Image (cartoon, rainbow, N blue to C red):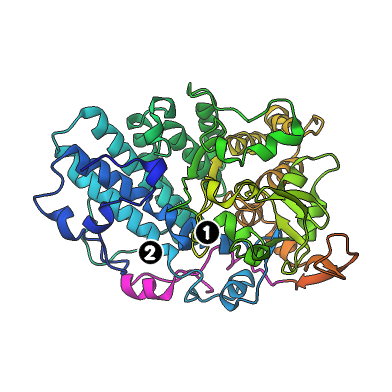
Amino acid sequence: MKKIIINKVIGAALIVLAAQACSESFTDLTPKGSVTSGNYWSTESDAVSAANGLYEHWRDDNMFGRGLFWFVNASDDMVTGRTDAGSAAARDFVATGNESRINSMYKKFYQIIQRANSILVNVPDMTINEEVKRRVLGEAYFMRAYAYFYLTQYYGDHRAGLPIVTEANMNEARFTRPAHVSENYQQMEQDLLTAAELLPLVTAYGANDLGRAHRDAAYAYLAKMYLHWARYDASKWAEVVRYCDMVTSSGSGRALINTGNPQEDFASVFYVENNFSPEYIFSVVSNNVRGCILPAVLFENTGYGLYNGWGYFHPTLELYNHFEEGDYRKKATILEFGDTFTLFGEERQYYSSNSWTGFQFNKYMQPFRFPQEVHLNPNGDYPTSNLNVPLVRYADILLMKAEALIMQNQNADAPINQIRNRAGLPSITGATLADLKRERRSEFAAEYTDRHVDLVRWGDAQEAYSKPATGRQHANRDNPNSPYTVTEVWPARNFNPAIHHVWPIPPADITNSGISQNEGW
């Protein structure tokens, strides 16, 4: 069995999907098929194939293709640009968890955990190259913690964590919820520390293995996990700083893309040629055959008749107005009527007959600059591209460190000013939490860093969502120079911080596992 090239075929030959198929039930965590038979788990290729299966969800539309973006879309940065009952229910915090938009991610994260557990059960006793064994085990520990990171971010709190399923209990039929999400954090901490010991630096990977988990990714998710843990235990702020510094000093050369040209530097972070730049610590690896559809999801609906954009998420006027004067991230993030851009090799002015707000996200549009065959899937019904979608960037490392320093009454000017200077903004002194919040919004709009999660953990969501979302209604939506009026595009919402800080666990998973639903949902 030939070793799979993860960053080129991304799931196209992931034999582990057949070998480790599991049922749709959350509680059915027992590996199926040849994974449990004697003819598997015998060769190095078997171990590598199993590790490759940990990344299969990257090409799943209901995960990082757009599924998890329904949660990001709850923020004040964007609105759902179509009449869509399921996404509206999530955005308005009246979802039940049964909605097709949001009812599959919970179990899919547990499928990642199941695959990781299968590796941790079987690979240690395999007689294979020791370096490969260490890496595969490191990937399993990392991806188990990674799955729990997103599960806890969306579904766990001080009232109840998420069922902890490891290689020790993976064959049990029923599970319980820990009393507090901190128990999940403790498990994640152990897994990520072990992963950091086992995994190499990304610089040790050849081109065929770029995209796999590596040591910096483990450090980065430790920092992200401690950032959330600090909501309940202030001592964890120091750990955020520690592991952000571990990323910086790991020896892998992590840095912002910064050539001293702010007009281009931030925009170029999201270019295909920078898929594996020193700024990208961990990302959804994609290609134009089997990959991530998110860029096309943000592209103009029907793509002016040229390509099948889906046009789901539109920037709000509030996000547009948020950027400081002179911030080059604004144009790199948002297209407004009349902006000049390149589409399929031809320069044109932006307009939209579909955008509810008069704007489009520009951040992931570089693949659309070229003829379609260069970076886009020729199958417009499955509009993937060669552009990786970031999950953790070095900018996040800098701003997590800055936040942790501020929360410990320490000076955070240096990391914040690295971010500001790259964007063409002047340095500030005595940076405050308000400064930090502004930089995170400007830097990470329309990314899986997740503005909604930030607002929730800061305690700002209720106030933010009590205001309607607005946009520009152009008199002639097919004319890039058409005048506009400002209109309300989404009414104010009722966000209850005692309930809506987490999402409802899908009822089918509640029934299958026997666990309790999040309170209030």
In the image: residue 108, left or right of residue 394: left
**How far separated are the C-alphas under marks 1 and 2?**
25 Å
The residue beneath circle 1 is 383
Q: Quadrant of residue 160?
A: bottom left
Q: Which mark is residue 107?
A: 2
- The residue type indicated by label 2 comes to Lys
Residue 433, horizontal then vertical, whole percent: 72, 42
Q: Residue at x 58, y 54 (%)?
A: 295
Q: Is residue 407 visible?
A: no
Quadrant of the image for the N terminus?
top left
Q: Which span is picked out in magenta?
A: 493-521
Q: Is residue 211 above or below residue 158?
A: above
Foreground residue among 265 and 41: 265
Q: Quadrant of residue 177?
A: bottom left
Give the number of marks. 2
Question: SS at mark 1?
Answer: loop
Quick one: which residue is furthest to the left in this view? 38
Asked if the stretch drawn in magenta spans residue 211, the answer is no
Foreground residue among 297 and 449: 297
Residue 481, horizontal then vertical, whole percent: 88, 60
Q: Is residue 473 visible?
A: yes
Asked if the stretch drawn in magenta spans residue 506, the answer is yes
Q: Residue at x 8, y 50 (%)?
A: 38
Helix, strand or loop: magenta stretch: loop
Q: Nearer the viewer, mark 1 or mark 2?
A: 1
